[in-house]
Image (cartoon, rainbow, N blue to C red):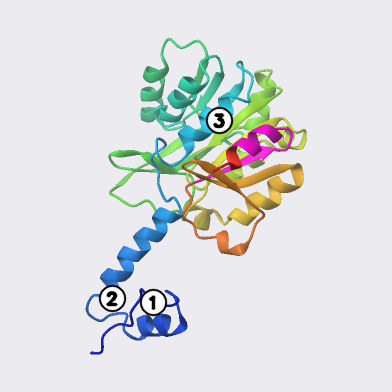
Amino acid sequence: MSSPPLLIYGSFMSKSVRRYLARNRHRAAIPILMEKLEGYVRGWKNFDYDPAHNGEAHFLRQAAAHLPPDSVLFDVGANAGEWSAAARAAMPSAHIHAFEPVPETFARLSRAMEGDPFITPNPFGLGAADSEQRMRTVAGDDTRATLLARAELKGESGTTLAVHIRRGDGYCAENGIDLIDLLKIDAEGAEGIVLSGLEGMLSRGKIGIIQFEYGRANIAARFLLGDFYDLLAPLGYAIGKIYPNHVDFRPYTMDQEDFLGPNYLAVFNRHEGLIADLAVR
């Protein structure tokens, strides 16, 4: 077998290198090499779910400097309250509405938030309509549960539960909420469904900032990154991917559909100062 072309010189992904890899993809160390290289690419693209390092904490600190102290925050897909706790640390006087439909996980959320008068835990999720739906879970991993029948759930299969879903616009009307300063959605592919239930708030410009997850679950949802752009950009939102020290605001292109995520940000154009600060590297 001939030696691989020298990857250090010339164009790393030159045509000859790409053709060599395709012809010899099963030989010797090629699969190991490509797995290593893919890991570096994922690092470059910020495939990191740790909020302390992936830019979520940085964003919350920046947002706290621009939002009013009594801001209203929605934590949709709150799990046990990790994001709510980080938001509370950044914005101590904000009122947080947390939504978690899985009963066992909601019990943990309630315990974590007990005694905090500025947090409202809700034992249901947000969606397109008031309904009861089936949610699949993973045994021993409460961070992954989905309403999507086609979504992959890696790990030991858990139970399928009946959970309650509320329409977001109805919840806001019922609770006298006229403005959501920051909406965070982690719904395992159902982010677009959550947004459809907040259509009224969105159309009236009543949601200032949206943090949403984007990844492989969006394949099952058939709601791609381009669909987020199609929905939010015409309403006046700047959209970009969250990185450890900045947000990469940019127009949509198809090559962004890499399903790596994990988090994107949509900021309403009235927050010009926040957009400018977040874009600084």
Front in this rendered view, residue 156 or 182: 182
Q: Which residues are magenta?
A: 263-277
Q: Quadrant of residue 67?
A: top right
Answer whether labels 3 and 2 touch (C-beta < 8 Å). Answer: no
Q: Which mark is residue 62?
A: 3
Name the residue beneath numbered marker 2: 30
User: Residue beneath label 1, please?
Assistant: 9
Residue 106 shown left or right of residue 235 in the figure: left
Rendering coords of residue 271 (x, y %): 69, 33
Mark sitting earlier along the chain (3/2): 2
Whether residue 171 is situated above or below residue 279 in the rendered picture: above
Q: Are marks 3 and 1 in contact (CB under 8 Å)?
A: no
Name the amino acid, label 1.
Tyr
| Separation (CA) of disc 3 from disc 1 | 41 Å
Q: Secondary structure at mark 1?
A: loop
Quadrant of image for the N terminus: bottom left
Q: Is residue 276 found inside the magenta-colored segment of the image?
A: yes
Q: Amino acid at mark 3?
A: Gln
Q: Name the element at disc 3.
A: helix
Between disc 3 and disc 1, whose residue precedes?
A: 1
Instruction: Return the x and y of residue 69 as percentages of the image width and height.
Output: 60, 16
* Mark closer to the observer (3, 2): 3
106 to the left or right of 127: left
Residue 68 lies, with reference to residue 137, above or below; the image says above
Residue 100 drawn above or below residue 33: above
To which quarter of the image does residue 267 belong?
Answer: top right
Q: Is residue 276 visible?
A: yes
Splitting the image into 4 quarters, where does residue 30 fall? bottom left
